[in-house]
Amino acid sequence: MITQNAVDVKNLTKRYNGFCLKNISFQIPWGCVVGFVGENGAGKSTTIKAMLGLLPVEEGEIYVAGHNVREEAGGDDWREYTGVVFDECNFPAELRIKNISKCMKYIFRTWDEQRFSGYLNRFELPLNKKVKELSKGMKMKLSIAAALSHDSRILILDEATGGLDPVVRNEILDIFREFVEDEQHAVFISSHITSDIEKIADYIMLIHKGKLLLYENKDELIYNYGIVRCTGQQAARIPEELIKGKWENAFETSVLVKDRALFENDGLEALMESPRDARPVLDKVTIEDILVYMVKNEVQL
Amino acid sequence: MKGLLLKDLYTMKGYAKQYVIVFVLMAGWAVFMKNMSFLVMYAIILGGMLVLSTLSLDEAVHFDRWSIATPAGARGMVREKYLLLLLAVAAGTAAGFLLNLVLVTLFGGMGSFEWEGLIITAVLFVIAYAVMLPVNFKLGVEKARYVYIGTVLGAAVILTGVLKMFEYSGRPLEKMTENPPVLMGVSACICVLALAVSYAISLKMVKCREW
């Protein structure tokens, strides 16, 4: 299973009435965490379902761990290497935790009972409890424990941290970090909680109305982008090619700009027509800022 | 597939007490009515109902979607439900016969035991499940439940019509039941054919559906 990328998606297209996932292409390199952000209905879950072969698609190629997901040849063995966690715990409510491992060892050829019980201990999940007796956080931990207890090399997480408190979320993010320390592992995580993505992701992928707006290295993104807070007149002096999003109200204009270095030091003064003008301010950006500004302006890099 | 089957068996174990209580109540009713074939018929129906319950529980937490994303895949998920149906109906039939034997031993002669009726009931319910399962995989368990009820009622009406036709044509059903192996063979063929066609359709439905 030596492939250049953990996941390779080429020209993925899926059409619905009133929505279309348009020609999506991206790669998930090994040893990386890719954060997938976008507003509700942007196409995140559709993309993930397509990657997992959970919906028929019209066009495109999807390779997960080198396997062409759209081809039946080769069977379902590639799923052995794919750990999946959705936005809810998928184990039936009546099932006891102690029985989950007994079932999983017949579902996954590579199921590791010891690793699973290690995670149960770490997460303090009581063996005798039924799934329905667990809190939401515990249920998600159980799902993650199951996803990590076979030979999963690619973790695909669809809103897996949604609805959890910050303490549990941090604990779970730590586990994903540990997982990806192995260079033969990769994580693809979609979430509305952009602060989580910011903490863990190496790359950020932004989708809006079925179109991929951005796929960039997170550090470069945060380093290169900035928000200039200024007046409308000052904003008009910013070169168009640097503007990636704009937000105006009666008091202030905020402009998401690329190449923030250009605005540092004297760059901001160049926006001022006279020394009496209020001095513009250059702020750092967060992933949430980039999401909000770009989605609002539908700018494509 | 074995793992999925185990999961269903563990899940059903959680409801075992309720099913046993219902079964015992029905056994009491059968003794009261002096109709032991009713008990076996009920056991067959109950076996089928267990499958419906597991489908419902799977859907509630989207276990079906998750299981397709595992090495079990779509094929394993569909196969398991058909196997579970066969096992549940077989177990229900066995339990019914066993309890019938116990009750007859305890209380003596309990009236007639219509094995022909039992076979027809079993065929009817297998057909109803054969229709219901693809609908479940396409539209979900709630709609499938209505289809199931509709199929049972529809099949019962058709069956009554066929029996009446036999009567009017001067070839009553007894003629058919004079030869048990033929009736059993025909019934088995109908069940196998219905389940095979149903399985193929279910698999297609699962592969075409968005999970």
Image (cartoon, rainbow, N blue to C red):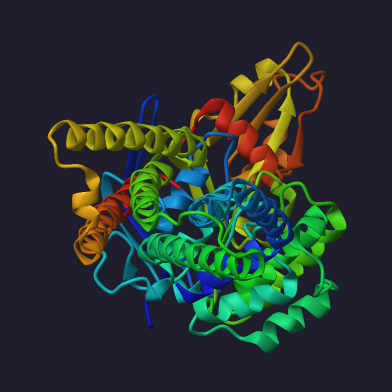
Camera-nearest residue between A278 and B132: B132
Where residue A216 appears, as percent x and y from the top left, is: 52, 54
**Residue drawn at point x = 34 percent, y = 50 percent:** B120
Q: Quadrant of residue B172?
A: top left
Camera-nearest residue between A167 and B202: B202
Most extreme residue toward the bottom, as rendered?
A114
Q: Quadrant of residue A1?
A: bottom left
The answer to whether residue A228 is left or right of residue A86 is: right
**Residue drawn at point x = 84 percent, y = 51 percent:** A165
The answer to whether residue A200 is left or right of residue A13 is: right
Is residue A241 among what the camera can see?
Answer: yes
**Residue drawn at point x = 84 percent, y = 54 percent:** A166
Most extreme residue toward the left, as rendered?
B169
Where residue B72 appears, as percent x and y from the top left, is: 43, 69
Where residue B51 appears, as percent x and y from the top left, is: 51, 55
Where residue A121 appears, as percent x and y from the top left, is: 82, 79
Q: Is residue A96 above or below residue A290?
A: below
Camera-nearest residue between B118 and A191: B118
Q: Is residue A38 above or below residue A232?
A: below
Is residue A180 among what the camera can see?
Answer: no
The answer to whether residue B93 is left or right of residue B24 is: left
